[in-house]
Amino acid sequence: MSESKKKVLLLNPPGKGVYLRDYYCSHASKAHYYWGPYDLIVLSGILKDHYALFALDAMDKRLSPKETLERIRDIKPDAIIFLTGAVSFIEDFELMQGVSEAFSGKIEIIGTGDCLLSEAPKFFDAYPFLDAAIMNFISDDIVYYLEGERRPFHNVSFRRKDAILELGDRILPEGEFSLPIPHYDIFPFKNYRIPHGLRLPYAGILTDYGCPFHCDYCIGGELGFHLRNMDNLFEELRELKRRGVRELWIKDLTFGVHKKRSFALLQRMRKENLNFTWACLSRVNVLDAELLEEMKAAGCHTIQMGVESASEEILQNYTKGITLEQARKIASLCKKTGVRILAHYILGLPGDTVESVRKTIQLAIELNTEFASFNIAMPRMGTVFRRNAIEKGLISDDLATLDNSISQPVYETAELSREKLWELRNEAIRRYHLRPSFILRRLFGVRTWYEFTTLFREGFSLIATTIKKE
């Protein structure tokens, strides 16, 4: 590939809400937290040595569409890679249509995000100005596409000159993958916040990609599963340390899947004396006492995990692959180890009733984790759950039903109306978070000033969402 001076802009579009478009999952922030556009951050490393690279996080800067367009005019890019998602695609594509018109169609427009990953042909059909879509943000296929190659790519879908679509099949090479260090200087990464963090600044990082599990309501299992080269990983960790980063969010969809490798990683973190504090995502059927102890010793303070429901039948029907006994055991082990849990619960999956939802709320209170997130069931694109919801007539198969903003119900069942489901969601948040014992435990558990201010800011904002739209 020849060197190029082509200007490429990485754009996180503005929005009416605070949208979190991240790792093929998009939703609206429930409070004031806002983490950066990780997909674009990774792409910046892949692209930085080939192009004149710019980044515009219009969401962080709270720009309007008009202000965003003015910034783009100032940059005059040859190509824009914009991040989108089911939560915001209508706004995102309206903006990009305006960009295309402002540049008389001469600018190359490339999208990436959950909706394009799962429904690319529909979006190419609906938006003629869309030139290409990135199907895997850790692949370097986009470099070759921007160089002008128009052969079939595994991880880029594009519109040929004859209007025929070349759709990527999302295949990565065999073996471990490596990532160049991101071009952090072009992002305001020190502005980014996570609600369960302890220190600033923080940065996201991947030690693997995809997920070996296949929950019906999640797209993670459709991504495949690939391990990152360990030396390459630690090269980035050392660079983050050099930049003053103190906190990590390990963005693996399930940390700890490969036990032997996970122990080697954790022991190396300790040996290199990196001294990061960090949070991650994992599962109750992956964790055990030995792994938790090693994670804690290496700086882990919080683990996100999906408990989802108090109904064993629902867990089985949606192929979650866990039991309530496992959830209770890991919750107890985490308390003993001193690692906090952010437990996720899904309310309103078909099969849920008022009674089963209230049992889920009671289970959450019983587990009494430091954080709990109650989310309305959403038929996300590319999932078995969505395909089944369409077949059952719960939702229609069109673009307008893809918006999953702020967890508002998009369907109802014979057992639960939309209004009742939203009422139960608000009941869950209040019953869980307004318990005096919970409030006192959270207050006495605060470890840093940043955590103290976050606790009040995010807590008030979360409770406020139960007052709106009732």
Image (cartoon, helix red, strand yellow):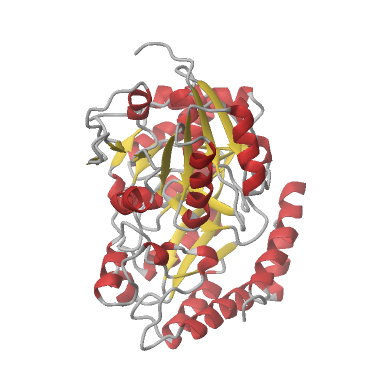
Location of residue 384 (image quadrant): bottom left
- Callout count: 0
Q: Residue at x 59, y 34 (%)?
A: 72
Task: Compare residues 74 and 56 and report the one nearer the observer.
Answer: 74
Question: Taking the image as drawn, is residue 8 in sight?
Answer: yes
Name the spot of residue 5 as percent of width and height, x first.
49, 15
Name the spot of residue 298 as percent of width and height, x first.
53, 37
Q: Is residue 309 left or right of residue 273?
A: left
Q: Is residue 466 above or below residue 329?
A: below
Task: Compare residues 147 and 181 and report the one nearer the observer.
Answer: 147
| Residue at the front extreme of this rendering | 104
Name the spot of residue 41 as percent of width and height, x first.
51, 34
Q: Is residue 259 above or below residue 346?
A: above
Q: Is residue 366 left or right of residue 159?
A: right
User: In which quadrant will I find the C terminus?
Assistant: bottom right
Q: Is residue 257 left or right of residue 298?
A: left
Question: Taking the image as drawn, is residue 293 in sight?
Answer: no
Q: Is residue 319 left or right of residue 407?
A: left
Task: Compare residues 413 and 316 and report the one nearer the observer.
Answer: 413
Q: Is residue 301 above or below residue 357?
A: above
Q: Residue at x 31, y 67 (%)?
A: 397
User: In which quadrant will I find the N terminus?
Assistant: top left
Name the spot of residue 271 as percent of width and height, x first.
52, 25
Q: Residue at x 54, y 51 (%)?
A: 20
